[in-house]
Image: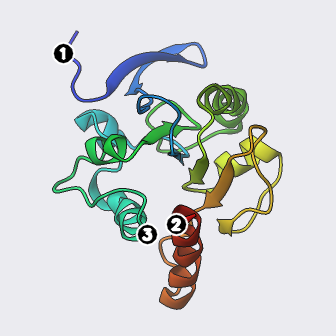
């Protein structure tokens, strides 16, 4: 067995022991949590989330004021310093996501978020939103809140036209400024 690095951990997922990434939570009630669909194989291999091209959305979140810009490819320390955590709907490296993954992950995600009660949930895709509310909402600030009163923001797709992207990230900046 190799030594674990970064946030690597072994977990049981659908009856199989897999190398994945542990959730990252700040001390106390989180100001926010970034919820991904799943973990990229590159991120699991390196032990840190949003590696490679995936960091584009984290840079957008930093520009919106969620946390400072990371000085390199590792985002967890700057997020934790800002009271921001990370979790995922699917706790395994993903190339493909299957309905079984979503069905298994949805109640786990709801329980994890309810345990930590973040003030803001930032969903990086539609699937965590569907897992939380049973329906899809468009990108931006959602018209619904979590059971504990937290606000929810769904990140737009990376290839959204720049004007629309700026508008939606402006909504997030407004949330963070309250």
Q: Are marks 3 and 1 in contact (CB under 8 Å)?
A: no
Name the residue beneath numbered marker 3.
Answer: 64
Pick the quarter of the image with the C terminus: bottom right
> Height in image: 132 above or below 159?
above
Q: Secondary structure at mark 2?
A: helix
Could you say where residue 113 lies in the image, as x and y percent from the top left?
63, 33
Could you say where residue 168 lies in the image, as x and y percent from the top left?
58, 76
Name the residue beneath numbered marker 1.
Answer: 3
> In the rendering, which numbered label is found on residue 177?
2
Q: Secondary structure at mark 3?
A: helix
> Which residue is found at the position 56% from the left and 35% from the top?
90
> Which residue is found at the position 52% from the left and 80% from the top?
165
Q: CA distance from mark 3 to mark 1?
A: 36 Å
Could you say where residue 71 lies in the image, as x and y percent from the top left?
16, 57
Could you say where residue 141 lies in the image, as x and y percent from the top left?
68, 65
Q: Secondary structure at mark 1?
A: loop
Left or right: 116 as drawn, with respect to 69: right
Left or right: 162 as drawn, with respect to 110: left
């Amino acid at each position: 067995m190799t030594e674990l690095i970064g946030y690597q951990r072994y977990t049981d997922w659908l009856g199989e022991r897999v190398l994945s990434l542990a959730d990252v939570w700040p001390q106390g009630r989180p100001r926010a949590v970034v919820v991904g669909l799943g973990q990229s194989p590159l991120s699991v291999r390196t032990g840190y989330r949003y590696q490679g091209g995936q960091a584009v959305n984290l840079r957008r979140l930093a520009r919106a004021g969620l946390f400072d810009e990371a000085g390199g490819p590792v985002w967890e320390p700057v997020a934790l310093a800002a009271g921001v955590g990370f979790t995922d709907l699917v706790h395994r490296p993903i190339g493909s996501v299957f309905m079984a993954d979503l069905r298994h992950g949805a109640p786990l995600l709801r329980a994890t978020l309810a345990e930590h009660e973040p003030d803001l949930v930032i969903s990086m895709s539609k699937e965590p939103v569907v897992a939380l509310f049973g329906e899809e909402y468009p990108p931006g600030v959602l018209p619904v809140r979590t059971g504990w009163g937290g606000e929810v923001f769904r990140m737009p797709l990376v290839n959204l036209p720049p004007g629309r992207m700026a508008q939606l990230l402006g909504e997030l900046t407004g949330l963070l400024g309250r």
